[in-house]
Image: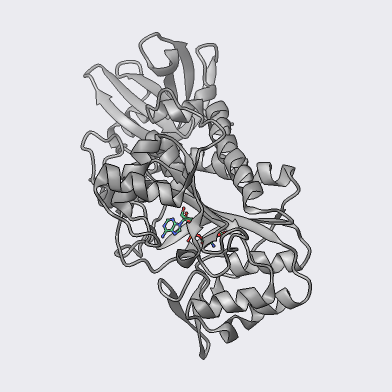
Amino acid sequence: MRTPIRAVTPESSTAEIAGWVHEIRDLGGLVFLLIRDRTGIIQVTIPKKKASPLVLEAVREVSRESVVRVTGTVKAIEKAPGGRELVPESIEIISQSASPMPLDVVEKVPAELDTRLDSRFLDARRPRVAAVFQIRSTVIRAVSEFLHARGFINITTPKVVAAATEGGTELFPIAYFDREAFLNQSPQLYKQMLMAAGFEKVFEIGPIFRAEEHNTTKHLNEATSIDVEVSFADHLEVMALLEELVIHCYSTVAESCSDQLAQMEISGFEVPKAPFPRLPYAKAIEIAAAKSGEKIAYGDDIGTVAEKAIGEEMGSHYFIVDWPTLIKPYYAMPSEADPKVSNAFDLMHPRMELASGSQRIHQHNLLVHQIRSKGLSAESFEFYLTPFRYGMPPHSGWGLGAERLVMTMLGLQNIREAVLFPRDRHRLVP
Ligand code: AMO
């Protein structure tokens, strides 16, 4: 039976391990093979004089990054990783690796991100890279557990759709038999329709597609969105839920990923504290003008430079609230007190936007009016609008970018580092 490398301790007497040949060090009379599996690294020590001919032949033939199985005796030794070594009785080469490799797993030569992504399967053998995806997995589990515990239903909505959600641009058209269809930009319309179905609390963790032209360090063409929709709740209630969820994700990672954080050399991992400040849009653009010199007219979007300046001023997670109705999507509810402002919010990390959401319009007539006032055709939204005529409860929700959450949590420089196989303007393989 194969033992995970981490479970081989100085107290073990014998062990059978299997993994990749991380390094080969030939010191003349002694050869060291470092063998790696996902749990750790062990030193296999081969004294040339004492080893069997079969073991010596395997050692001569094996190349780095080959998959091997080794059985032998465990000895306590202080200098080796984990305080133990394995002296082999047999070494079986299960799968020999070709060389030279397109990427150095041991990373003596640091590689460009593009080279790493071209050979992601090798890149992800690096414990530091694998740690990102173990943490990402923990974050997704934390989200799912958190929402299930609060009575949410996990939904799956179509990714092949007939209409835009977030406005007409940024859509990927596809051929759907003899009709035009699109890859969905957001589950927005579907999660809202399920409020009319009486589900009350839904969530989805799934792909969203955006034909963003710009190739930046924080945009993907295929991203993962954590979407939530709640009936009988206003924007303030779903903001509180979002804040609690983000903190829960950080706490879960702090509690259960200490090895991975150490692997990534992240020390002093900080869990953000509630409440996140609520910054009105009008104040945000004032800060941007004062700090970055970038003047934003009321009603214009907050661009990257301004976002950065505001982020520096705020220093930790915060919400931007009281957005002008004009720049928020048609489904955002205008404030009762001042309809020029909508009940919409963005959750910000000092580096970038993480989520946006709002209280939604639940009145059919108002929604049709808003769709038309954005220059969109209400007819193409028929399937979405009909449920609003047969008993639609008031509701609110948000969409949180999973990659941006992981990227900002781990201080990654490029969003592509938080995706196994990113899709961007230039990348369609692997
Ligand atoms: P929005 O378009 O702001 O809102 O998207 C929500 C969040 O999804 C992430 N995101 C992206 N991440 C990486 N690359 C992209 N191209 C990309 N586009 C979006 C961001 C963003 O904050 N329907 C609304 C949500 C709602 O109101 O419920 C929506 O899609 O982190």
The answer to whether residue 95 is visible is yes
Horizontal and vertical percent position of residue 356: 51, 54
Which is nearer the eye, 200 or 395?
Answer: 395
Residue at image position (26%, 52%) is 294
Residue at image position (23%, 19%) is 27
Which residue is situated farthest in the front direction here?
337
Which is nearer the eye, 321 or 392?
Answer: 321
Residue at image position (58%, 41%) is 243
Which residue is situated farthest in the bottom direction here?
178
Which is nearer the eye, 249 or 93?
Answer: 249
Relative to 28, is 395 on the left or the right? right
Horizontal and vertical percent position of residue 191: 65, 64
Residue 170 location, quadrant: bottom left
Does 327 sit above or below residue 400? Answer: below
Residue 425 location, quadrant: bottom left
Relative to 354, is 193 on the left or the right? right
Relative to 344, is 156 on the left or the right? right
Type of colouring:
one colour
Does 62 sit above or below residue 341? Answer: above
Does 62 sit above or below residue 205? Answer: above
- Quadrant showing the C terminus: bottom left
Horizontal and vertical percent position of residue 171: 43, 73
Horizontal and vertical percent position of residue 368: 61, 79
Number of numbered labels in the structure image:
0
- Quadrant showing the N terminus: top right
The answer to whether residue 126 is visible is no
Residue at image position (32%, 22%) is 32
Residue 335 location, quadrant: bottom right
